[in-house]
Image (tube, rainbow, N blue to C red):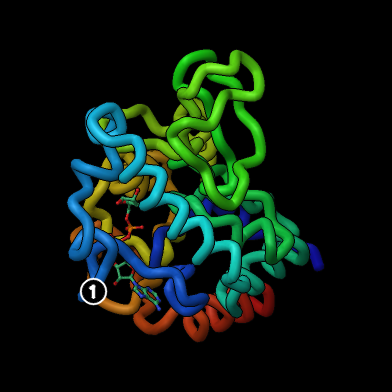
Amino acid sequence: MDWNPGKIVVLTGAGVSAESGLGTFRDAGGVWTRYDLNEVATPEGFRRDPIKVHEFYNARRKNAAGAKPNAAHEALARLERDCPGEVVIITQNVDSLHEAAGTAAIHMHGRLDRATCASCGAVWDAPLEMHAADPCPECLEPATRPDVVWFGEVPRALDDIAGHLDTAAVFVAIGTSGQVHPAAGFVSEAKRAGAHTIEINLAPSDISELFHQRIEGPATQSVPLWVESLLNA
Ligand code: APR
C-alpha cells in the first residue's frame, strides 16, 4: 500500500468510554451533575477534605477497573497498527481503556491507575483503594493523591501535544464536549497547521462548527466505520 494519509492525531474524551459503562461528565446523569467538581476535582477541595476526594476516586477507579475497552478503542488500536501514517492518541480520560485495547495514549489529565505524593512528587501504580492516611512509599508523608490533573492544575505533555498538532495532517476529536481548555483549543491549533479536522460525537458539541467534517453517532459504530473508510481509502 503506497497510500499514506500523513500523521493522524486523535483526541478522545469521556464519550469514547461511555459505551464501556464509564460515565461522561456533562451529559444527563453525568459525573458533574452528581458531584461538585470544586469539592472533588480541585487542589483546594483535596486540601479541605482529602477523605472525600479519595472516596470519589476510589469509586471511579473501581468502576474503571471493571470496564472493558469497546469497539471504538479497538478500532483506534487497529488504526495505529495498520495505518501507514503515524497515529498519535491524546486522551482527556483518566481510564486506561486505550492501553487495554493495545494502544499507547498521552494522558493529558493523568491516570486513575497511578498515584502520586503531594509532598515529594513520587509516582507509583495506584492500589484499588487509596486513603488519606496512606504514607507515601518514598517519603512516608500521608500526602498520597490520585495522579490525575485537577481543575486549576496544568495538564500533562502540553509541549509534546503542541508538536503533534503542528505536524498533523488529520486531527480527529472523539467523544468530547469541547468545554474544557486547553483540549478544546486543539482543533484550532491543528487547523492552523493545515490539518483536516473531524469531530466524531453522539451529538453536536460546543466546538462542532470549528471542524471541517462531522460524523455523528455512538463511538462504537462511528469510529470503526471511520477507521475502515480511512484504511480502505
Ligand atoms: N459516543 C460518542 N460520543 C459520546 C457518547 C458515545 N456513546 N456518549 C457521549 N458522547 C459525547 C457527548 O455528546 C459529549 O460531547 O461525549 C462528550 C462528553 O463530554 P464531557 O462529559 O464534557 O466529557 P469530556 O469532553 O471528556 O470532558 C473533558 O472535563 O471534567 C473534565 O477532566 C474532565 O477530561 C474531562 C474534561
Query: Which quadrant would residue 60 be assigned to in this image?
Result: bottom left
The kind of residue tagged 1 is Gly
Q: Is residue 10 left or right of residue 69?
A: left
Residue sitting at x 59%, y 52%: 128
Residue 7 picture location, percent across and down:
60, 49
Residue nearer the viewer, 46 or 179: 46
Residue nearer the viewer, 172 or 118: 118
Looking at the figure, which quarter contains the N terminus? bottom right
Q: Residue furthest right?
A: 1
Q: Is residue 159 left or right of residue 23?
A: right
**Residue 42 position (above or below residue 173):** above
Answer with the quadrant where ligand 1 appears in the image: bottom left
Number of residues whose C-alpha sits closer than 10 Å to that of mark 1, classed few (under 14), some (14–19) or many (20 or more) = few
Residue 142 picture location, percent across and down:
48, 23
Say what secondary structure mark 1 lies in.
loop
Residue sitting at x 48%, y 69%: 17
Looking at the figure, which quarter contains the C terminus? bottom right
Residue sitting at x 62%, y 45%: 127
Residue 40 picture location, percent across and down:
28, 44
**Residue 198 position (above or below residue 86):** below
Query: Which quadrant would residue 38 be assigned to in this image?
Result: top left
Circle count: 1
Residue sitting at x 34%, y 61%: 176
